[in-house]
Image (tube, rainbow, N blue to C red):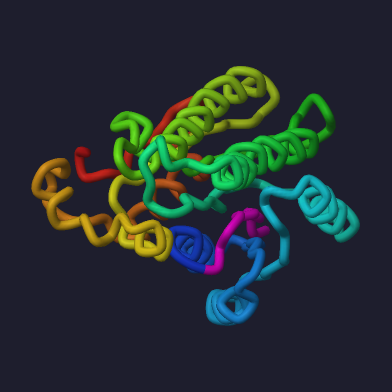
Amino acid sequence: MAKTVLITGGSRGIGEAIVRLFAERGWSVIFTFVSNSAAAHKVATEAGARAIRCDSGSEDDILALFETLDGEGIALDALVNNAGVSGPKRRAVEVTRETLEDVTRINFIGPVMFCREAVKRMSTERGGKGGMIVNISSTSTRKGGAGQWADYAAIKGAVDVFTNGLAREVAGEGIRVNAVAPGYVLTDMAVDGGIAANFEAALLAEVPMGRISETREVAEGVYWLCTDAAGYVTGTVLNVSGGR
């Protein structure tokens, strides 16, 4: 019987690559999107996955999503918290409260709530069968995001700390919790945030392997953490960053 994975933010970029990879390898794939329904349905059709609209920063939407899955008798084997926003490129002195609240809501509050609901259902102590959770972090946590998005980097640092803490909490309940930290990846978010324009200089200065990551390479790291091959791995942040 195919395993089932829920991936947040699967209509483009790294999320799309994760959706396609899991589907190719025989998983039943459900993914969320919030606004670009055309892109989401295109990915769903091509990958043989299921797209469900859900604002990953809205508790009401998250609860409704899990209620839908419960009603259909769907038990998750894995959750991938990929949905995220960076906001525009900015220095710390330019950060607005609105941007900070938006980035925090989607990149931290949402993943914590998704984890909460997944753990309730996966935990062997609550009658579940166990499972895997992978949170998408960033290597900006080590660099600080100076001159680009220091607040975003700090929030991703909070994701790392939460990943470690949750992993310790639920290790005895059949649940493994890890994170994947990409480096520079040419995604829509990088373009929208103004980071892509600086890739060439950044590569020369920071990436030992001398090239930008492909989204598929990040997806491979996520996939591995959700397989039995990583059965003794929990509380870990896997860097997929070319040595950055």
The answer to whether any part of residue 216 appears in the image is no
Q: Quadrant of the N terminus?
A: bottom right
Secondary structure mostly seen in the magenta stretch:
loop
Could you say which is closer to the camera, residue 78 or residue 62? Answer: 62
Q: Quadrant of the C terminus?
A: top left
Compared to residue 200, the image places residue 144 above or below, namely above
Q: Is residue 43 left or right of residue 233?
A: right
- Which segment did they paint magenta? 1-11
Could you say which is closer to the camera, residue 146 or residue 43? Answer: 146
Q: Is residue 166 left or right of residue 210?
A: right
Could you say which is closer to the camera, residue 189 or residue 244? Answer: 189
Name the residue located 60 percent from the left edge and 73 percent from the top edge.
36
Q: Residue furthest right?
A: 71
Name the residue located 83 percent from the left edge and 29 percent from the top edge.
126
Name the residue located 41 percent from the left edge and 36 percent from the top edge.
93
The answer to whether any part of residue 13 appears in the image is yes
Q: Give percent across and percent down for residue 223.
A: 46, 50
Magenta stretch holds residue 108 = no
Compared to residue 104, the image places residue 234 above or below, namely above
Q: Is residue 233 left or right of residue 3?
A: left
Compared to residue 217, the image places residue 231 above or below, namely above
Magenta stretch holds residue 4 = yes
